[in-house]
Image (cartoon, grey):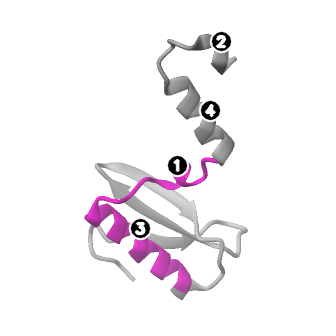
């Protein structure tokens, strides 16, 4: 079944029982696993991603996977270098 343009898609990769979603933001394609074998849940996840894009709250799957220790390191590296002895 063909979907309306701009509404993304759900599909299965060859050899995988999991559903995947594909959608675009500013012309860039995003693909991610839904970690489910239920097509309805996959469709709901796609709808949620499209809503995030529409509302301007979309951060992307890569940023969502960022761990706390990585965030702390990014924070420390972003601080001014006026106190380098305390950052070591």
Which of disc 3 and disc 1 is earlier in sequence?
3
Q: Which residues are magenta?
A: 41-67
Q: Nearer the viewer, mark 2 or mark 1?
A: 2
Q: Secondary structure at mark 3?
A: helix
Q: Is residue 88 magenta?
A: no
Q: Secondary structure at mark 4?
A: helix
Image quadrant in which you'd find residue 49: bottom left
Query: Badge 3 is on which residue?
Result: 49
**Residue at the image point whose x is 40% and y is 62% from the top:** 23
**Residue at the image point whose x is 36% and y is 57% from the top:** 24
Which of disc 1 and disc 4 is earlier in sequence?
1
**Residue at the image point whose x is 42% and y is 53% from the top:** 59
Query: Badge 2 is on which residue?
Result: 85
**Residue at the image point whose x is 49% and y is 73% from the top:** 10
**Distance CA(mark 1)–CA(mark 3):** 14 Å
Query: Badge 1 is on which residue?
Result: 63
**Distance CA(mark 4)–CA(mark 1):** 14 Å
Which of disc 4 and disc 2 is earlier in sequence?
4
* Prevailing SS of the magenta stretch: helix
Residue 71's place in the image compared with 84, above or below, is below
> Residue 73 got which mark?
4
**Distance CA(mark 2)–CA(mark 3):** 43 Å
Image quadrant in which you'd find residue 88: top right
Q: Is residue 64 magenta?
A: yes
Which of disc 3 and disc 4 is earlier in sequence?
3
Callout 4 environment at 10 Å: few (<14), some (14 to 19), or many (20+)? few
């Amino acid at each position: 079944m063909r979907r309306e343009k701009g509404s993304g898609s759900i599909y299965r990769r060859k050899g995988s029982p999991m559903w995947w979603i594909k959608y675009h933001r500013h012309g860039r394609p995003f693909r991610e696993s839904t970690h489910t074998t239920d097509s309805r849940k996959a469709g709901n996840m796609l709808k949620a991603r499209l809503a995030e894009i529409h509302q301007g709250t979309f951060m992307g799957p890569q940023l969502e996977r960022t761990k706390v220790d990585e965030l702390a390191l990014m924070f420390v590296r972003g601080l001014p270098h006026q106190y380098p002895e305390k950052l070591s």
